[in-house]
Image (cartoon, grey):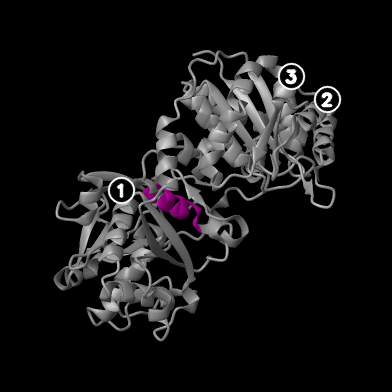
Amino acid sequence: MQNPKYIFVTGGVTSSLGKGIISASLAKLLQARGYSVTIQKFDPYINVDPGTLNPYEHGECFVTDDGAETDLDLGHYERFLNTPTSQANNVTTGRIYQYVIEKEREGAFLGKTVQVIPHITDEIKRRMKLIGETGKYEIIITELGGTVGDIESLPYIEAVRQLRWELKQEDCIVVHLTLLPYLATSHELKTKPTQHSVKLLLESGIQPDILVCRSEHPISKEIKKKIALFCNVTPNAVIEALDMPTIYDVPIAMQKEKLDKTVLGKLKLSSKNEPDMDSWLNFLTKHKNPKHEVKVGLIGKYVELPDAYKSIIEAFVHAGASNECKVKLEYIHSELITDENANQKLGHLDGILVAPGFGGRGIDGKIIAVKYARENKIPFFGICLGMQISVIEFARNVLGYKDAHSTEMNAKTKFPVIDLMPDQKKITSKGGTMRLGAYTCELSKDSKAYKAYDKTKITERHRHRYEFNSKFAKDFEKSGMHITGINPDTKLAEIVEVKDHPFFVGVQFHPEYKSTVLTPHPLFVKFIKAAVEYSNS
């Protein structure tokens, strides 16, 4: 394979414009034309990875097969491209500096003064090209976090400038995402913020090749021509990016704007065939024309920021389309659920999902929610901590172990039905030390999980320190909660189910990480199917 082509996606004017979605949409269109594409994200914060960040601060931490704790944008990349990402797809400033400092301590720089230029920028460039050196991809899209002009982003912008100088002109392009604000008083779109943003890039030595302009209103030919003239780009390189009903409409909108064709022209690549988006359009049709509707309660403690549960939310979109069903999610704060108001909060729901999380806050409300779902035969799905809560609830209310708990919340409980994993007991460092990444699980053939997956051996991604305490396994089995999924190597309980229930499944892993547009996760699909049946009954 020839050397890969590089596309860098930068952002200006304001943050949260949607660089991740634009990157994923462009990648989807290029993939649909027959190119092998991957996307990587470079984040300017100094944390080594997002694993220790508060969900309120940064949203969900996404986990890859190889155990990397990464930015939530990698979830978008996987959901759009239907291909897994890895450790190499997400790099932070913290990781760059950590690596360079470790090399300096080893004496690798032979006593030279270590500086941002060339040492930090050289390491950024090395990381930018790392995936390309595998030979697997023809096009590599790199999203640069933050906004042009941020102090934190300067080394990345400089690294891109150097790479453009080192590579052939047609091997490396920059797509710059900006905002065209609309002034209601004068009824016009303003181009000046975009001009200033491009000027900032030019001051750093980078001329963008394509401008993607976010706007609430259509951009006229005259405005496109004006932007092209004052930002030194060709008129066809000014792309309109209107607000869309869903993120899954964006690839179709970008196709209409010919973003993929313009990119291929700049990279001097043939258009191959027109993008094959039939399966994507089929998904959109089902998503927008549901035959059923269900209400599902997402019980968590970070519900003020839905991005904390981004992959779960999107997994419901995929599973909903698969069932031709609109999933109306209700975010219910677990701290607000009590025995007295449980019926009011939960009684109208067709399904209850208890979400992952850490720490003791909101645990009582989650236990009440599980009890309500189990006793009222409402379809229930517990993920990671949600599975552990279902075990605690069953131990207390069915086995009669009133003190049953997880040692995470109560180290002195007489019935530690959830306990710290043995290999975690000597670990004190927090970053990247949990049980992370893909592990094998073997399923019982008489289980709901087996019916969902239709196979006995699966691999799923994990992110936890605590596990089901197998000392109590026989007690649970006797009383009706069965362990239906087990890790063959550690004998760790991965899945629990209550048999005399339409759908009561708790999983220690995170199935939401592997749900994509084209392959909705089977457990989410079956959960929504059960919710539809419950609603109809």
Task: Report helix, strand or loop for mark 2.
Answer: helix
Label 1 to label 3, Cα distance in Å?
A: 47 Å
Q: Nearer the viewer, residue 71 or 254?
A: 254
Give yes or no for contact between labels 3 and 2 (Cβ–Cβ under 8 Å): no
**Which numbered disc, 3 or 2, marks the residue closer to the eye?**
2
* Residue highlighted by disc 1: 522
Disc 3: CA contacts within 10 A as few (<14), some (14-19) or many (>=20): few
The part of the chain drawn in magenta is 309-320
> In the image, 29: left or right of 15?
left
* Residue highlighted by disc 2: 229
Q: Where is residue 132 in the image (x, y as percent from the top left)?
A: 54, 24
Q: Nearer the viewer, residue 362 or 182?
A: 182
Task: Report helix, strand or loop for mark 3.
Answer: helix
Q: Which of 405 and 7 is in front in this view?
A: 7
* Residue highlighted by disc 3: 165
**Which numbered disc, 1 or 3, marks the residue closer to the eye?**
1
Can you say whether 287 is above or below 364 in the image? above
**Identity of the amino acid at label 1?**
Pro
Mark 3 or mark 2: name the one nearer the start of the chain.
3
Residue 417 lies in the magenta-colored region: no
Task: Report helix, strand or loop for mark 1.
Answer: helix
